[in-house]
Structures are given as structure tokens and as C-alpha cells.
Image (cartoon, rainbow, N blue to C red):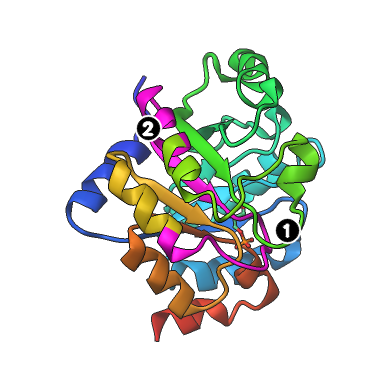
């Protein structure tokens, strides 16, 4: 059965029209359900186009409960961005089926994926194969700790671009350049534009983006979709700043 939101097809369509996409990342471990309706009110009035749900360490069932609640407040597509198989829930619209291709931990290249299959079979979730590249940002991030992988140094631009291209040639549908949640430095614009030149698939960029200028710079450099979590978590007025 086709998922009615057709998330990937619409991403491609938006990009072909020159639109820039913004995903608000909601971490089930940090978002209190009591605060959700106010947060969603702001989100719905903002320029956000997608809601990503996920985190590095999330307690069992928290993701499903949160997605059910979010759905009551929005018609935006809800996309799982899971740190672990336990975060997969059929309540969402789509799933980023992430391969951590910057690292060499087989669990995050194929192991978790195999475990996920029994949860995905029979669900209506749209599965979107996504290459995930962790780039060093100045401090250790949760992804690094949890996955026990080393990010690619920022100065290894060619290696980052080659990793992205290899992912595309392996058939991945999206490529995600990640500095890590709460990163000190977002992915540098030079890296975004260099990677973008080599890729045909859409480019996602996230981690450490806290200002409208950083967001615009990421788009100018070639990001098709930007993911922001911490800046909204820390201050919901950031939703209004982006409109101004
Ligand atoms: C993390 O890229 C996302 O996986 C978003 O990062 O929380 O720093 O915005 P921030």
C-alpha cells in the first residue's frame, strides 16, 4: 500500500520547484508532552515543512506516544530519525533508514537494519534509504558515543564528498551531513557546497544551526533540507525569528 503522504516524492517535487525545506527535530526524551501543544502551535505557524522525531537515547515507547500526540496537532509529514530500532513506530509517515557511512561499525551499516525488518513488515511506513555522515564539530556528540564511531575531520573534505558519492552509488535516496545535536560548529558551508556538487540526490544538513543566517548559509551552499532541534528546544521564539 502506498503511504498517502508520499514524503520522498514530495521532497523531490519541492526541490524541483526551488523550495527549501526545514525539519524541526523533536527528541522524545527531551520533549515533555505537557508542553507539546504550545510548541506545535508555534511550529505550525512557522516555515517548517517536516517534523523529524528521534534521539540518540530514548526510553521504550516514548517515540510512539509522542508521534501519536504530534499527529493530533499537525498535518506536516512526521519522519522518524531513529537512534535505535526501538524508536520505530508505524504511527509516523516515513522512516529515514539510516546507514552511518562515515563510520565502520557494522551494527550501524547493516546490523540494526536487519533487526528493523520485522518491525517494518506490514507497516505503512515509507522507508527512505539515507546515508548518514558524521562530521567532527569541535566536541564529542551523542551519535559518536552511542555508535562508537569516529566522525570525519572537517578538513577531510574530499573524503566527506567521496563518502557521500559512494552512498549515492549504493542506491541511497538522501544524504545527511550531520555535525551532531548541539554541535559547537555546524557543517561548514565549504563542505556543503563541495558535497553538493558531487551529488544528484537531495542533501540534508543538520547539527548546531542556531541562527537564521546559519540556516540561510546552509541553503545557499546547497542544502535542500535543514534539520534544527536544539535551537527550538531551548527557545521557541526561534520559530518567530525565522519568519522575520
Ligand atoms: C541532530 O542534526 C540534528 O541530529 C539537529 O541538531 O539539535 O543541533 O539542531 P541540533
Look at the image and say whether residue 176 sits in the magenta stretch.
Answer: yes
In the foreground, 167 or 2: 167
Residue 223 visible? The answer is: no
Of marks 2 and 1, which one's residue comes earlier in the chain? 1
Q: CA distance from mark 2 to mark 1?
A: 32 Å
Circle 2 SS class? loop
Q: Residue furthest bottom?
A: 244
Q: Residue at x 68, y 20 (%)?
A: 106
Answer with left or right where residue 75 lies relative to residue 105: left
Query: Which segment did they paint magenta?
Result: 163-190
Circle 1 SS class? helix
Answer with left or right where residue 18 lies relative to residue 132: left
Q: Residue at x 35, y 63 (%)?
A: 221
Quarter holding residue 149: top right
Which quadrant holds the N terminus? top left
List the residue tagged with mark 2: 173
Amino acid at each position: 500500500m502506498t503511504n498517502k503522504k508520499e514524503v520522498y516524492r514530495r521532497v523531490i517535487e519541492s526541490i524541483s520547484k526551488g523550495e527549501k525545506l526545514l525539519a524541526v527535530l523533536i527528541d522524545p526524551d527531551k520533549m515533555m508532552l505537557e508542553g507539546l501543544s504550545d510548541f506545535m502551535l508555534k511550529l505550525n505557524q512557522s516555515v517548517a515543512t517536516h517534523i523529524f522525531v528521534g534521539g540518540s537515547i530514548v526510553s521504550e515507547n516514548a517515540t510512539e506516544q509522542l508521534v501519536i500526540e504530534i499527529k493530533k496537532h499537525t498535518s506536516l509529514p512526521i519522519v522518524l530519525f531513529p537512534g535505535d530500532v526501538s524508536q520505530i513506530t508505524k504511527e509516523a509517515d516515513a522512516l529515514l533508514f539510516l546507514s552511518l557511512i562515515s563510520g565502520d561499525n557494522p551494527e550501524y551499516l547493516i546490523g540494526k537494519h536487519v533487526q528493523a525488518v520485522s518491525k517494518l513488515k506490514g507497516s505503512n511506513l515509507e522507508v527512505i534509504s539515507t546515508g548518514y555522515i558524521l562530521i567532527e564539530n569541535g566536541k564529542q556528540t551523542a551519535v559518536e558515543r552511542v555508535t562508537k564511531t569516529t566522525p570525519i575531520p572537517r578538513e577531510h573534505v574530499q573524503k566527506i564528498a567521496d563518502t557521500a558519492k559512494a552512498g549515492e552509488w549504493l542506491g541511497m535516496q538522501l544524504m545527511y551531513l550531520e555535525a551532531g545535536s548541539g554541535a559547537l560548529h555546524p557543517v561548514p558551508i565549504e563542505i556543503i557546497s563541495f558535497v553538493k556538487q558531487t551529488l544528484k540526490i537531495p542533501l540534508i544538513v543538520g547539527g548546531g544551526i542556531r541562527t537564521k543566517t546559519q540556516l540561510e548559509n546552509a541553503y545557499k551552499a546547497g542544502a535542500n533540507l535543514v534539520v534544527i532541534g536544539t535551537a527550538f528546544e531551548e527557545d521557541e521564539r526561534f520559530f518567530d525569528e525565522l519568519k522575520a
